[in-house]
Amino acid sequence: MALIAIGVVIVLVAGYLGLAAGAKLPPFSKAAASPSALAACPSGERLQAGQCVAPTLSPSPSATATASASATATPVASPTSSETSLASVLPSYITGSSDDVCQSQSGGDLVAGGESAQELCDLSNNSDVVEDYVLYAGFSTSGTATTYFDTLLSANGMKEGQGDCSTLQLATASDGSSQYCQGGYTTKGGSGSDLVFTGSNDFNLGNGTLVSGLDECLGSTTVDVVAFTDPGYTAVGVALDCEGGEYQAVDEDFTSGDFFLGG
């Protein structure tokens, strides 16, 4: 029986081998091709679905730049005359000579109420000019400056609109002690009110301050005065000649713009 079983197995094996050889079944089939090596991807890429692809980079959150609030420059307003030091805007006609001496005044030396500043310039040692003094009275408002100018008229026997300052035709003061003119003026520096006076050396500058009390005017009998409202500042200027008889020359310096603040 064992021999018969072995024989049957041999027959089956032989039959299969014959069939396999014809059908090219294993072990007679071609060996399966060994898998080809995977294609290498460039550095930084990876193989996906048979293709090299670059990795998708998730953008890293960038820090949001917070703009620092820079201080906005606040424009500084142009100073008004009440905020401006008179000493810093005195005209070069005065400051250009070392012989001229200017002093800031306050308290009892002020010639009017409401003044914000006062400068008295002594030009008596300057042989190149006819003026002995130029006084500047600064005010906070144009109204107070005008009030002071009007006080110069009333305190010295003068009235508005008398004479003609453009031609220096002078009217006689009510007390007969002096001659003067008063009116409006226009020069290349601007416009305002002015007066020209020649006469008594007791010309009252205000608050009881008389020209005759100034050092260079002691003993004089007549004085020349040119007073004006300054077109660029809320101020009144008063130019003085202690000897008298020079009012035409003082007025020429005024109309030339020599006395204007900031000039």
Image (tube, rainbow, N blue to C red):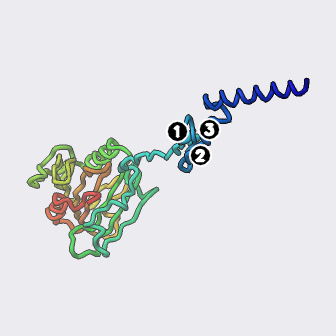
| Residue kind at label 1, given as amino acid type | Gln
Q: Position of residue 162 (x, y in %)?
A: 15, 46
- Residue 39 percent location from the top left of the image: 55, 46
- Residue at the spot of label 2: 37
Q: Nearer the viewer, mark 1 or mark 2?
A: 2
Q: Quadrant of residue 252?
A: bottom left
> In the visual, does 200 lie left or right of 33?
left
Q: Which numbered disc covers residue 88?
A: none
Q: Where is residue 150 drawn, in percent x and y? A: 28, 45
Residue 179 percent across, percent down from the top left? 16, 54
Query: Which sits earlier in the primary sequence, circle 2 or circle 3?
Result: 3
- Mark 3: which secondary structure? loop
The crowd level at tag 1 (other Cα within 10 Å; few <14, some 14-19, many 20+) is few
- Please, is residue 209 above or below residue 129 in the view? above
* Rendered residue at 17%/46% (across/down): 184
Q: Residues within 10 Å of mark 2 (few under 14, many from 20)?
A: few
Spatial distance from mark 3 to mark 1, Cα to Cα?
24 Å
Residue for badge 3: 32
Specify the farthest residue to the right: 1
Q: Secondary structure at mark 2?
A: loop
Q: Quadrant of the C terminus?
A: bottom left
Left or right, 15 with reference to 181: right
Residue 148, visible in the rendered structure: yes
Q: Which residue is mark 1?
A: 51
